[in-house]
């Protein structure tokens, strides 16, 4: 068993997480900061540096041979920049070059967070053994990644499978991405909560978020339940369109909103039957992710391991030469 480690960063609108990951996908060291999502770019970067400082200060760091980043998107792995919809201070932000300098020139691989999640679930989770699958993150935003012909497929820029910005409501509300009626604009956690409040649901002392709405829905609140059903409908429409295009056999859903369990999955599976009508998508299965909140870190490490051809990492088995995974 190789003693090499891969460092990983998982950057989203809520948190910036870091870890050192071994060849079995186990996280040996962790660090985390809240994302100052509304701050200017250098302030957000300072939080990333703080996470990296914790990792590099450990004795295990001397075993690290590469670093992977899974970031909210869009990203551009071809030039190493990120422009997360939910972090407006970062637009074409040169994340890879800044991280590479901070870690002494180690190889750095960048992919979108959905691609990272797909890599994690294919290596360690619910997409293991699948030939073609769609893996989704439903949280502060909605992202996705693809497994095609038995391998994670990031696409040329690291964004392939970004289902959150498929438009499923042609005259829908404006999305921060610039389009209208996107899956994310309807099904993300913040939008689930906003819709419930707009419909008359009253948040308790803990405040209004997707988890609180899910709890209310379980308790029988009709407005809360309706907000989740609307989110499920948007997800089902996006999933059916994606499945019809590339014939995936399984959809894996993770992220904070997926923690609602059957409050989300029951209406999603029911509604998907209405959208996925063609014979080759009718048997599509939808399952919860297994790698949980560690998916972004495990997947970012998997992408870096695959890019570097690291022996001893299960993530690189079956990798194709020339597969675009960042720089």
Image (cartoon, rainbow, N blue to C red):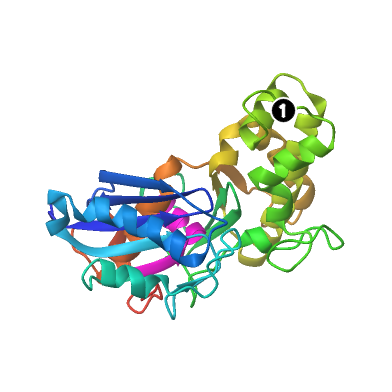
Instruction: Tell me, yes or no, if residue 237 can be seen here.
Output: yes
As drawn, the residue found furthest toward the top would be 219
Q: Secondary structure at mark 1?
A: loop
In this rendering, position of residue 318 left or right of residue 144:
left
- Crowd rating for badge 1 (residues with CA inside 10 Å; few <14, some 14–19, many 20+): some
Locate the C terminus and report the quarter of the image it occupies: bottom left
The magenta stretch is 109-122
With 102 as the anchor, is 62 left or right in this view? left
Q: Residue furthest right?
A: 171
Is residue 134 highlighted in magenta? no
Q: Nearer the viewer, residue 303 or 189?
A: 189
Find residue 16 and report its horizontal and vertical position in percent: 42, 52
> Mark 1 highlights which residue?
203
Instruction: Choose top left, top right, bottom left or bottom right for residue 300.
Output: bottom left
Magenta stretch: dominant secondary structure = helix
In the image, residue 136 above or below residue 79? above
At 79% from the left and 47% from the top, the residue drawn is: 274
Total number of numbered discs in the rendering: 1
Task: Indicate whether residue 113 is drawn in magenta.
Answer: yes
């Amino acid at each position: 068993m190789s003693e090499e480690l891969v460092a990983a960063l998982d950057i989203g609108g809520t948190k910036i997480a870091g870890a050192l990951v071994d060849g079995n996908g186990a996280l040996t060291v962790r660090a985390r900061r809240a994302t100052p999502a509304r701050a200017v770019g250098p302030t957000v970067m300072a939080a990333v540096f703080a996470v990296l400082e914790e990792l590099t200060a450990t004795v295990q760091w001397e075993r690290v041979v590469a670093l992977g980043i899974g970031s909210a998107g869009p990203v551009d792995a071809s030039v190493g920049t990120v422009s997360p919809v939910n972090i407006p201070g970062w637009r074409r932000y040169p994340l890879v070059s800044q991280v590479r300098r901070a870690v002494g020139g180690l190889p750095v691989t960048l992919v979108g967070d959905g691609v990272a999640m797909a890599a994690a679930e294919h290596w360690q989770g619910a997409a293991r053994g699948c030939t073609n699958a769609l893996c989704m993150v439903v949280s502060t935003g909605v992202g996705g990644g693809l497994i095609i012909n038995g391998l994670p497929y990031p696409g040329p820029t690291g964004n392939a499978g970004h289902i959150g910005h498929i438009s499923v409501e042609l005259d829908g509300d404006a999305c921060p991405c610039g389009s209208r009626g996107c899956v994310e604009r309807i099904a993300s956690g913040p939008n689930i909560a906003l819709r419930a409040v707009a419909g008359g649901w009253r948040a308790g002392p803990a405040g209004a978020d997707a988890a609180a709405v899910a709890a209310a829905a379980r308790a029988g609140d009709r407005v809360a339940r309706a907000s989740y059903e609307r989110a499920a409908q948007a997800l089902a429409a996006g999933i059916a369109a994606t499945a019809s295009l590339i014939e995936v056999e399984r959809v894996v859903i993770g992220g904070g909103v997926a923690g609602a369990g059957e409050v989300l999955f029951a209406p999603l599976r029911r509604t998907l039957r209405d959208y996925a009508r063609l014979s080759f998508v009718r048997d599509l299965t939808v399952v919860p992710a297994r790698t949980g909140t560690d998916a972004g870190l495990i997947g970012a490490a998997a992408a870096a391991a695959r890019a570097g051809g690291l022996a001893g990492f299960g993530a690189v088995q079956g990798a194709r030469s020339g597969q675009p995974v960042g720089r």
